[in-house]
Amino acid sequence: MTSWTSIEIKPGGSDAPMLAFAAGEALYAPAAVHDRIRAVVKATGFEAKPGRWLDIVSEGDAGSRIVVIAAGANDSEDRWRNAGGHAVEAIRALALVAARLPSAAELGIGEAFADLIEGVLLHGFRLDQGRSNPVPGQFASTLSIAQDDAPLAEQARLRADPVNRARAWVEQPANRLTPAAFADEAEAALAPLGVRVRQLGLAELEALGAGGILAVAAGSSNEPRLTIAEWRGAPDREGWDAAFVGKGLTFDAGGLNLKARPGIAKMKFDMAGGAAVLGAIERLALRKAPVNIVAVVPMCENNVDGKSYRPGDVITSLAGLTIDVQDTDAEGRIVLADGVTYAIREYDPGVIVDVATLTGAIMGVLHEDFAGLFTSDDALAASLTGAGAATHELLWRLPLVASMAYLVESPVADVSNLGAPGWFGVGGGSPVAGAKFIEKFADGRRWAHLDIAGTGWASRRSSRCGPGATGFGVALLDRWADLAVADKG
């Protein structure tokens, strides 16, 4: 079972070093220690720039040690989540086994205390597997808080846990997180929260006619799954407000169009879209959101075997549309096509949003800062972009117009997964071609595609996490879900 560790947040008193925060001339600490901190800041010339801290140690009581953390600028909406991350970095650098926070009232930050704790939990994340002898001292075992702040800390935990679970899945090695293991773990995590989870296995997918998923999975000894997670937070209202469809490739070798090093070693992350939509369902269930949303996640491996599907094959999707397979490494759009079709047929949702690490080329345009947003629906684009801005999971809308249909034309099938002959150079790695392909299967519904190939894995620190899996999309979709009811367009 995939698990992770983070700093334990524990209500109650403590003699551990106290954390305080500074931003410019502003000081966030109990009034009783303001003068002491200001004197040391003046004597040392400490500048409160994010990423810096000041360790104040003096003789006397054990609890007299204060670590002053530089917080972000006052105009930064994400400043306290970011400050929580810097607190974790200071704790690790100073090898503290425990620390304590003043109360939200003493810090003078009110409900932003929950953002601070969320930052601690997100930046304190470590996958709890891999080493037989874990490296000690990587983070404090406990962070003590005031008893009165326990509800805010619990609020932060409910926001952080689904993100960290998604990150743990993404970082889990592919030999441990097979499609079956992924599906079982999703069910174990969500079912106790009142989410109805179903799994369709190989025989059921064959009976269903899910030709896209079956073709991609054919080269792997690990059988595919189609995992469906239903959250009905508004049971008195008929129908489904939205469907989230997430790409769940637990490993993507590229198939017969084999990926090269070093990129292939990272391909355990190719299920980040699936992890994101399941994480969003978890957050909805934890806060009992009054929405009806289903997540559909095709889970499989794209591997190499004598049974692998081949370039030049023509396969039949669940929708009945034939697909000209020009590149077996353009597999994500193929499984998403079946996932979108299943969502439409079984749930008739008001909106469909798919999330996928679809194209490496998106990184050449948006790098790790934005996910690509594709939709022809202006209102849907606006609501998703707004949710991204509010959660600091940023989206950038890219063009998706009818004249780009040539990117997925085929002379032998209804649609090509790479691009029409003569357009391979344009269509092959094109994020737009990937979106146009999926759009064919959206069947004219309100639909958006998020390409998170750049944002699903970080090479550097951000306000939300350190290097590694980011859990991108969990917070965004959770925030957007409430709009799915109001924004019928």
Image (cartoon, grey):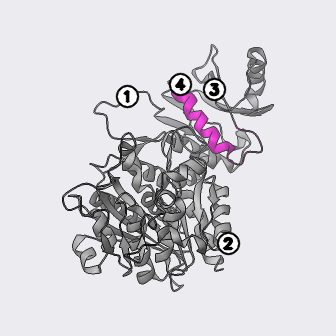
Task: Give the CA distance from mark 4 to mark 3.
Answer: 12 Å
Query: In the visual, does 259 lie left or right of 467?
Result: left
Element assignment for label 3: strand
User: In terms of secondary structure, where does tag 2 sit?
Assistant: helix
* Labels 3 and 2: the sequence-earlier one: 3
Report which residue position mark 3 lands on: 67
Horizontal side of 434 relative to 47 (left or right) equals: left
Asked if residue 191 shows in the view, the reply is no
Q: Which mark is residue 135?
A: 1
Residue occupied by mark 4: 93
Could you tell me the amino acid type at mark 4?
Ala
Tell me where residue 92 appears, x and y as whole percent: 51, 28
Cα gap from disc 2 to disc 4, whole angstroms = 47 Å
Residue range (magenta): 72-93
List the residue tagged with mark 2: 378
Give the side of residue 278 with respect to residue 108, left or right: left
